[in-house]
Every structure is written in C-alpha cells, then in structure tokens.
Amino acid sequence: MNEKLYNEILKAENYSDYCNSYSPFLSSIGLQVSEGINGVGDFYLHYNRVTRRIFKNAIAFDKPMNKDLSDITRIVFGDGETSPAFYKSDAFLFESRLDNVGLFPEKGEKTIELPDVVLGDTVFFSGYSENGDERDPDKYVPYKCGVKIISGKYDDRVITPENGLIRFAAVFAALDIDDEMLNGILDVCPDSVEDAEFIGKALLNAQLKDFDAEFRPEDYPLIAKSVRGLIFNTAACPGKLKNHLTSFPNRGGYPAQFIWDTFFHNLAFEEMSVSTAKEFLLQMIENQRPDGKYPQFICSTWDRPHEAQPALAGAMARRIIQKRSDKEFEQTVLDSLIKNNNWWLTQRMTDHGVIYAVSGFETGQDNSPRFDKGPTLAADMNGYLLDQMKFTSQLAEKLSQHDRAEFWKAKADLLEKNMMAHLYDADSNLFFDVSVRTGEKIRIVSPSSFIPLWAKIGLEPEKAKDMIEKYLINEEYLFSKYPFPSVAYNEGCYSSHDWWRGPVWISMAYFMLEILKDYEYNEEYIQAVKRLHKMIGDDAKMSELFDSQSGKGLGFAPQGWTCAVFIELCRISGEE
C-alpha cells in the first residue's frame, strides 16, 4: 500500500477513555494512555455488550513522564525509558528503567478480586467482574491476568529493577481461562519491546494486506484514523465468539457483533483484508440459531432475544464473493441464507405477503417515529429481504443448484409483487410502512422509503426517477447541506439531533448513495459524496451519527460504520 498512508496509519492517538483505549491487534482488552495519568490508567475488558474496568491505574510510575503517542505498535513514555507494546491478542510486553513500577494497585468498580498467586517468576491476578448488563444471564465474568517478571524483583504489586531494567510480559483472559494457554503466551514473549513492536507491525500488516486503493493525500490523516478505529474495534473474543474474529461497532459503547453494523464494516475490510471480512460473516453464520434467525447482536455468553436485524447477510456475502470466489465458503453461505430466508418467511410473514418488523430496534432504527404506533410492515425490512432472496437465487445458480435457484427466484418475485401491492402508494409515488394494528400507511418520508429501490424492485424506471427527484434529491425533504436525515426535514416529527428522528446516520446515507449511483444521478451522487465527506471530516471524530442541521457528531466514536463509509467516500473522491 501507499507508504505515506501506511505511516499515517501507524500514528497513535490519545487513548484517553473506554471508547478510545489502547487496544490493538485483535485484543478484547484496552489500556488507558493519556496526559494527566502518571502511568497506564484504567484496564478495560471490551466484550459482551458492556465494557468493564478491571483495574484502575493499572501500571503506576514513580515519577511523571510525558507520553510520545507516535506509533500504534508501541507507546513510549519519557525519553524512551518506559514502553509497552502488544505482541499478541490480549498480551503485551512492558519495559522500564524507572526505580519502581506499581502493578494493578487498584481494582475496578464492581470487581471481586481473588488473592494473588506467585509461582516462580509469574504472578497471577484473578477475580470476577460484574457484567453491567442486566439482560446478560451471567452476572459476573471470571478473569485472570498472568504477569511474567523477566527482569526485576516483584514484591506485593511493586516491581523494582534488576540491573537497571524492569521488564515483564502480561496476558489477560476472561471467561475461557486456560492456565496452560496463559503460560504458553508468556513463555513466547519477545526478548525486547523492540521485538514486540516488530511483531505488532506484522499483525497490523495482516489487516492491511489487500489495501491498495488510491486516495487523495489530503485525506490520509482521517483515512488513517478510520483504519485504526476499525482495527481497534476488531477482537478475538472468548465463549460463543471464540472461533472467528468479531467486529465491534465501538469497543467502548457496543462491544458485541451486530449484523447490519458488520455489513458496513466490511465495506472497508473487503478492501483491507478480505479474509477478515469473511471471518465476520462466518461469525454470524456460526451463531445462527437452528431455526435460521441471526441474532440481533452476538456476545460471548448470550444473544439479544426477540428482535432480529435487517436481512443483509446476502448483500455482505455478495460483495465478498465478488472479491474472492471460494466454493466451500459459497455453499456455507447459501445454506445459511436459505435458513435465514425461511425464518423471515415463517416468523415475520403476514397475510399481506410481506413481512413485519416488531419495533425500531429490529430495523436498527431504535426510536424511529415509523414505530410510534407499534409493529409495521416495514418498507426497508422487506427491501433488505427481497435483495437477500434475489441473491440466494443467484448464488444457487452459480453453484449449479437450479431447483433452489428457481424456488428462490419465485419467492422473490412474489415478495416483490406484494410489496408493490401493499407498501407502494401510487398517489405519493413512494413506499411507506403500514401499521400492523390499523392497516394504515405511515406517511413519514425517510430514507427507509427508498430501500425497495436499492433492492431493485420492479418499479417502472420513470416512476423510480420521479420518486428520486421529488423526494431524495429535493432539499425540502432529504438533500440539504447535510443530506439524508433519518426523517425528512419537513416532517412534523423531525428533530435534527434525536437519534433516529432526524439526525444523519451514515449507514442509511450509504444506501441512498447506492441508489443515486444505480439510477445514474451522477451529479447529485458526487454532490452527496462531497457533503457527507465534509460533514464527517469537519467533525473528525468518526462519530456514530450527526446533527442534520449543524453537522455536529453525536454518540460514540470512533464508530465502525462511519469509519468504513468514510474510507469509501474517500475512495470515490480519489477517482474523481
């Protein structure tokens, strides 16, 4: 990849809080490293939906030192006299020439510590951390941290130097605790922090092996920030998630794998590392219920019950397969999609021949006014399923399974016919949700109304173009300075900053860009790309959502889908 961009990616940031912890190379732990903390601050555990603070002031120095946050593979304190570097998932090497270093002097809130165990040159710290999410059936999670003293003397959580040097390796495990594995990771620790840094660069390069897109140099700093955010939000987790990599929307705010967030994360990972993108999809497939439902989100010990999420596994798989054909993978995907399609058609089907969504949470649009009156026949959810069923047919045909291909084409054709009959409003020339309780159309203009176009529903081209021109690229509705708010600007329920009632969500904005491109609104497509690029760039935090009047970033940051879509926006801009 471009050397200047790579060097930008290497630059470290201020890892000052639980959403921006120092958590590189597939780790589910994070360290707080920032000014104003004399040492390494809080020690976070990122997984299972709620981040926990295991230790406070995890590594305490005996004197104040400045921090050089110049390289994500190694943090340097002072004039190089103290430095940690990760060498493996959840494991790091620490070197220091200080007079003493305090190790885990304070436990985190709601943490039950067990007595320390010293075995030769290794100390084990263990206990139980309260989960923090009342929906999780496991109130506490067990953890264990092994610290191998390589150079120095340990006494009651204080290490003093030996021959002027303190050096130790640390490895952390939660839920799945295997002493042999912990000792094995400690035994293969590098001989120096420089060696750990070298290993870290190799781990980083593995996540960038396919990254060769061309970008404008002025975009490098924020592309690099986005890449770092995506990589730091990727983890090797225990429990139900242990067989594949997990993609977090945000390691502090949302440490779990969500289906439609992953759809967007993979926009970037398909360019950075296709094998990692496949891992995320396989994680979903492996955790699919026997009846075909993909959980709304997946945690190490539990899945969110009741709600599902948009049927986007097919679209995700289509992009991956276009990048790299693999018949075994394709067959796995096909079998999974058929099971999921059947779940929707049996568990969410109505007498109208279209599916319903139980709440905004099922669509991913938590408090959308579309659901103020309860469950709806949701235009977007039917659009996502239509696209997935179409792809199921195409994939079956690719694998020479012609009967399956014909079956799912017929199912898709029937769903499309029923969507036109019940969700399309000819007078308004727009798709609307329908209230399950009253049967009335919910006449709220939002990006969700256009998802059937994204799914290439069989609407006459002139009507599709009229719909786009009347609503999607009309500044009174959805195309002002900050385009594609989650509810049209002129709706009575519009609020520029209230979650899904008016802010810009880059996820839905991406779908609108795809529609403009598909229907060849090239000028408006480029305008929208520029406006969204500027909005995200001006905020510069990769925020979860944006106020649609001011452009101010809201929610958690760095949010995975904003990072991923921003990289896509920069790629498009680089081609102009």
Image (cartoon, helix red, strand yellow):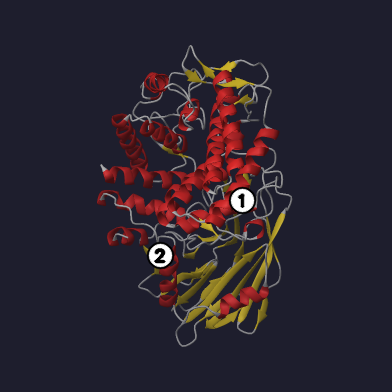
Please name the residue shown 48% across and 21% down the image: 445
Say the numbered circle drawn on residue 285. 1
Tell me if residue 124 comes above or below residue 67 in the rendering: below
Residue identified by numbered label 2:
205
Question: Is disc 2 placed on a helix, strand or loop?
Answer: helix
Tell me if residue 71 comes above or below residue 213 in the rendering: below
Tell me whether the residue at label 1 lies in contact with that at label 2, contact meaning CB atoms closer than 8 angstroms.
no
Q: Assign the N terminus to one quadrant of the image.
A: bottom left
Give whichever of 302, 139 is nearer the camera. 302
In the rendered structure, which amino acid carries the disc numbered 1? Ile
The picture quadrant where one finds residue 461 is top left
Question: Is disc 1 placed on a helix, strand or loop?
Answer: helix
Give whichever of 138, 39 is nearer the camera. 138
Please name the residue shown 45% across and 56% down the image: 274
Q: Is residue 533 visible?
A: yes
Please state the horizontal and vertical placement of residue 410, each as a whole percent of the image.
Answer: 59, 32
In the rendered structure, which amino acid carries the disc numbered 2? Asn
Please state the horizontal and vertical placement of residue 13, each as a whole percent of the image.
Answer: 39, 57
Say the numbered circle drawn on residue 434. none
